Image (cartoon, grey):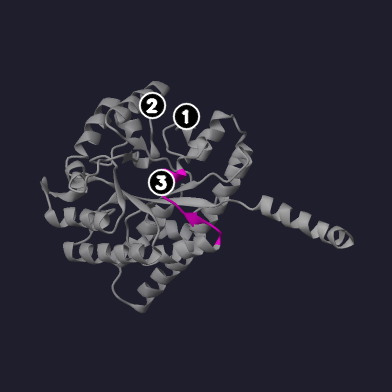
Amino acid sequence: MRLFLRALPLLLLSLTVHAAEIDRRIAVTIDDLPWARLDEIVPADLQARHAALMAQLRQADVPVIGFVNENKLEVDGKVQPARVQMLRDWLDAGYELGNHTWSHMDLNAKGVAAFQQDFLRGEQVLRPLLAERGQTPQWMRHPYLRAGRMPEDRAAMDVFFKQHGYRVAPVTVDNGEWVWAFAYANVMNEQPDSAEREATLASLRKGYVPYMLNKVDYYEKQSLALLGYAVPQVWLMHANELNAATFAELVAATKRRGYRFVSLQEAVRDPAYARGAEGYSGRYGPSWLHRWAMAENKPKEFYAGEPEVPKWVMKLAKVDGE
C-alpha cells in the first residue's frame, strides 16, 4: 500500500501529461496544377521542375491532393498532352486530384453564374482522366479562398457543388507561401547563374520552412483558443519551384512538431468543418478558422500575432502585400 501511495503522484502526473497531449493532424493540399505561373517558364524547364516536385512528394511520402486549373493545360486554346501527362504523374503516384476552376476565377469578383460556367469548364479533362481509373472528381478548391460574399451566393454554390458531386476543400493554415514562391521563381528565372544567385536561393529555402512552421503553430493556437482542441488542419500550398526544393524538408520538420499527415477526407471529418465557410462576407479569403471566429464575433485582438512574410522576401517577389 505504501508503495502504491508513493507511486500515486507520478501516476497522476503521467495521466495529466497524457491528457494534455495534443492530437496534431494535418492534410496537405496543393493548388494551381499542373504548375503555378506556368507560362513564365519554357517547356524543358517546366518538365524538370515538375519532376523535382514529384521527387520531393515521393520522398515526403504523405497523403496529398492537388487542385487543377485546366487553362494551364492549354497553349493557344489546345490541350497539350505533355501537360496532361503531368496530371497523370500525380495519379500514378497515388495522389488525388480536384477542381480549382478552369481559369482560377475569383467567385467574389465574377459572381455565381460566371463562376459555375468556369468551374464546369474546369472538369473537361479532369473528369475523363479520373474516369480512366474508376474515379470521379470529389473535391473543389475556391481560387483565392473566395467562397462568395453574400449568404445567398454561398447557398447557391452549396447546391451547385452538391448537384455535381463536389465537396469544398477548406483551408485552415492559410499563409504567404505564394509570396516566398514568387521570390524563389523570380530569382531562378531572372538572375544569371552566380554565387550570389545561389546564396539568395539558399536564404529563401532556409527562411521558408521556419515561416511555414510558425504559421502552423499560429493556427494551432487559434484552434485551441476557438474550439478548445486542435482541429485537424488543412494546409494550403502550390505547385511551384520552392516546394520542388523544400517539400520533403518541410514535411519532416512538421513531423518533428508532432504532426501526423492525413488525407483531406480524414481531416474534414472533424465536426468543426460542418460550419462551412460562414462567418465572413468580405472580398478576401481568410482561413476557415478565422471565418468561424468571425461568426462568433471574436474581438480584433483574437487574430493578433499571425506571422508575416519578411519585407526582403516581398521585395524579391515584387508584391506589396500578402
Q: Do tag 3 and tag 1 residues touch (Cβ < 8 Å)? A: no
Residue 57 falls left or right of residue 235:
left
The answer to whether marks 2 and 1 mark residues whose Cβ atoms lie closer than 8 Å is yes
The label nearer to you, 3 versus 1, is: 3
Return the residue nearer the eye: 252 or 187: 252
Residue hosting label 1? 278
Residue 167 falls in which quadrant of the image?
top left
Question: Which residue in the protein does label 3 denote?
Answer: 264
Counting other residues with Cα less than 10 Å from the Cα at mark 1, is it few (<14), some (14-19), or many (20 or more)? Answer: some
Q: Amino acid at mark 1?
A: Glu
Residue 136 or 285: which is nearer the viewer?
Answer: 136
Ranked by sequence position, the earlier of labels 2 and 1 is: 2
Query: What residue type is disc 2 on?
Result: Arg
In the image: residue 97, left or right of residue 220: left
- Coordinates of residue 28 in the picture (x, y in percent): 41, 52
Q: Is residue 280 above or below residue 126?
A: above
* Residue 94 sits in quarter: bottom left
Residue 304 appears in the rendering: no
Q: Where residue 7 sits in the image (x, y, percent)?
A: 82, 61
Quadrant location, the N terminus:
bottom right
Seen at 40% across and 28% down, the residue is 149
Tell me, for residue 154, which label it has, or none.
Answer: 2
In the picture as drawn, the residue positioned furthest to the front comes out as 1
Question: Amino acid under label 3?
Answer: Leu
Magenta segment range? 257-267
What residue lies at 28% left-to-right and 38% top-to-bottom?
105
The percent coordinates of residue 188 (x first, y second) are 31, 66
